[in-house]
Amino acid sequence: MNLRPVTLLLLAALAPGCAESAPPATAPGEGIRVVQVLHEGLQFPTAVASPRDGSGRMFVLEREGRIRVLDREGGLLPEPYYARDVATMDIEQGLLGLAFDPGFSENGRIYIAYSGAAEGERHGLVLRRLQAGDPAADRFEGTEHMVMRVEGLVANHNGGDIHFGPDGMLYWAIGAGTGEPADHAHARRTDNLLGKILRIDVGDDASGARNGCGQKGRAAYAIPADNPFAGKRGECGEIYVLGLRNPWRFGIDAASGDVWIGDVGKDREEISRYRAGDNPDQGYPACQGSHDYPSTGATDCPQRTGTSAPVFDYDRGVNGRCAVTGGVVYRGSIPALKGAYVFSDSCSSELLVGRPSAGGGLEVESIDSGIAPGYGTVASFGEDEDGELWFINHQNGGLYRIRGRD
């Protein structure tokens, strides 16, 4: 595996749990290897996730509307676990997000996010709960219903990723929608759900969300009381983070609960970290990363606007990069990656592995993933039940796993 060492100075360190990790004995690229688990069989995968039920299975979304299953040995089962019609008129539409309820092995609950095609679901993103009758089955049989719908998304810049946090809440990334930054003033408005990370309670007793904006009639979720805008008249209580353009992929640190967001920009790509209690406004469209929009060359946008600075941002075109793929703070067993933030760019195809530096920045190694550069390659990361990292190549359908060197 080829290494291209790069040092990138970030504006903030990782979570305290990451900073306390001892430096690896070897550089990440020397301590890991990328293994391609599947070469064929998947069509335009968008996400990979584990049910964490002890089965060893991995579930993969296909953009066209299917959920596929890999068995414990890594074999792809021939029949889809689940399928539905979704809108796929744009490459950023389709079946986009998958999250297993933390109690899935007992309650059989799975959540999916997608661009709707059915009547009453079009021109927006839908969050739907699948209630499996048998959680151990490899084919879905059960009931399903819509939990929430966000209107106003007609083509690209949808976001769509979903995750449960260690707090048991469900987090959902919503893009600002099609158009230019000048069209996206709503991304910073608190009476609108576009350009946000949402946080909702979908537990057994959760219903009837107050000051919620994502459901007409009685809601099938509740708003956590500690959300930044919970209980405030005229504001959407579901909002957790705002001021985003296209938060295509994000992750939640299992140790700290910090939210790490990969926000795909127009001219600049950025990674933001939100810790509970921080300023939730990430600044878009007034800012793109640390720069004004349109850019004047100044880098004081967060200070001038009173918004949060990204932890990392870069110009498009650097090393062939053009679309950041948010990743994961690694909590698995590979010594070379412990506590590191692993992410990518879906044009350059490289794996970016970062650790806090002694000076409070982040030292990042760019590792050759073995995937040729090209638009829409490394598009999503996922963790298995042991906390080990997997990722998908949307362009050619490949599924990969990151392993330590023996």
Image: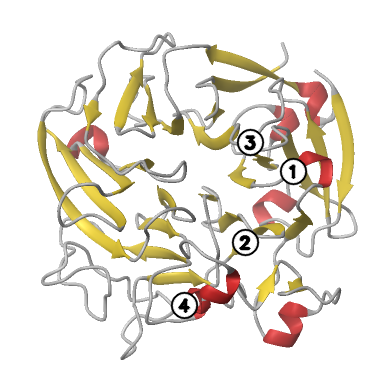
Q: Are marks 1 and 3 in contact (CB under 8 Å)?
A: no
Residue 232 position in % (x across, y down): 34, 88
Q: Mark 1 or mark 2, which is nearer to you? A: 1
Query: Local crowd at mark 4 within 10 Å, few (<14), some, or many (≥20)?
Result: many
Depicted 211 relative to depicted 366: above or below: below
Q: 317 and 173: which one is in front?
A: 317
Q: Secondary structure at mark 2?
A: strand
Where residue 208 sits, quadrant-wise, is bottom left
Q: Are marks 4 and 1 in contact (CB under 8 Å)?
A: no
Depicted 71 relative to depicted 83: above or below: above
Which residue bears the numbered disc 3? 375
Query: Local crowd at mark 1 within 10 Å, few (<14), some, or many (≥20)?
Result: many
Residue 280 seen from this side: no
Which residue bears the numbered disc 4? 186
Which of the marked residues, 1 or 2, is nearer the chain's N terminus?
2
Q: Secondary structure at mark 4?
A: helix
Q: Secondary structure at mark 1?
A: loop
Where residue 124 sits, quadrant-wise, is bottom left
> As drawn, is 226 to the left or to the right of 106?
right
C-alpha span from label 2 to label 4: 21 Å
Residue 159 position in % (x across, y down): 46, 53
Q: Mark 1 or mark 3, which is nearer to you? A: 3
Q: What is the number of the mark on residue 321?
A: 1
Which residue bears the numbered disc 2? 273
C-alpha span from label 1 to label 2: 20 Å
